Amino acid sequence: MRTKYLLPQWSYIMGWIMALPGFVLGYLFLFKKYEIPGFGFRMRDNDGLLEKAFENFTNELAIVLVIVGLLCIAFSKRKQEDELTSKMRLSALHWGVITYYLIYVSVFVAENLLVSVPFIVDHYLELNIFTPLLIFIARFSFLKLFNRDIYLVGNVKLLPNRPVKKIGIVLTLLSLSIAASGLFSPLKYPFSYPLIYICFVFGLLLWSFSKYKIEDEMTKSQRLESLQLAVYFNYFLLLIATLFTYSLDFLSVLAVANFSPLVFFVMRMEYINYRNMNSLRGLVDEK
């Protein structure tokens, strides 16, 4: 199992050079209300309810610096890229993605079904953007420091194939179909929408992190590649949204980005699994 789609080794240093100032700038913007003077331009004639006539891009600059910086730190090549390093990457990616969704689902449920905490509700979508990369970097660095033997790095814990994967698929498709039907005829109860959304995300999680019938080294390699590409795709989407959308449009893209990594991951893994099964059937038929 070897890791593909890595950035050059020098990007590790560049990542720190970008991420640290980005975090400082983000802190100043979020907690001190600091904006770089004149860093923006007038986009409207008058201030709107949620949109200002003059858009300052301090927040956008901080987000871009942090995202690009953390991506460079996380996915730059190390001096030694071998089987052990790939295994560490897969473990760290799983930790990062699962932690992100634990935080996201917990706050979403609390906000919509229980009680909301003002600061967390207002900013958790923005702050949680960085969770997968931060957890990945922390976990990967820990494993690199303290686990120098491949046998000391445990296998990634996955849910059983049966019945978990089927439950995940059914839950995902069912919640998606109910949500689609709600576009044409509104659902009776307002709380139905957040409940359906939670079921959709939960179904995707079950689908993503349950075993396939065949779990071997090739499957692990494909998981690593798919998860890594899903993270790339998600942050590319967030960067585009940060640079070209504002206010409610940005929040809409942010909402989609909360489940897009799982959708990308399951689609790619299912395609690869389908292709592998067809190849296997072809070999059997030839014999």
Image: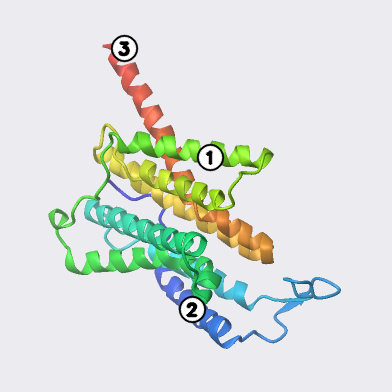
Q: Earlier in the sequence, mark 2 or mark 3?
A: 2
Tag on residue 168?
Answer: none
| Three-letter code, disc 1 | Leu
Circle 1 Cα neighbour tier, 10 Å, few/some/many (<14 / 14–19 / ≥20): some
Residue tagged 3? 285
Q: x and y percent of residue 207 in the render? A: 38, 41
| Three-letter code, disc 2 | Phe
Q: Residue at x 51, y 49 (%)?
A: 197
Q: Earlier in the sequence, mark 1 or mark 2?
A: 2
**Residue 128 horizontal side relative to residue 166, left or right:** right
Colouring convention used in this rendered image of the protein = rainbow
Q: x and y percent of residue 147 in the render? A: 17, 63
Q: x and y percent of residue 38 in the render? A: 73, 84
Q: Residue at x 50, y 69 (%)?
A: 116
Observer able to see residue 139: yes
**Residue 234 horizontal side relative to residue 37, left or right:** left
Which structural element holds mark 3? helix
Q: Where on the picture, by quarter, is residue 279?
A: top left
> Which residue is at the front of the view, 72 or 27?
27
> Which residue is at the front of the view, 130 or 284?
130
Circle 3 Cα neighbour tier, 10 Å, few/some/many (<14 / 14–19 / ≥20): few
Q: Residue at x 65, y 65 (%)?
A: 243
Q: Give the alpha-carbon distance from disc 1 to disc 3, as whole Å.
A: 37 Å
> Where the N terminus falls, by quadrant?
top left
Residue tagged 1? 176
Q: Earlier in the sequence, mark 1 or mark 3?
A: 1
Q: Give the alpha-carbon distance from disc 1 to disc 2, as whole Å.
A: 36 Å
Which structural element holds mark 1? helix
Residue tagged 2? 23
Depicted 158 relative to depicted 115: above or below: above
Disc 2 vs disc 3: Cβ atoms closer than 8 Å?
A: no
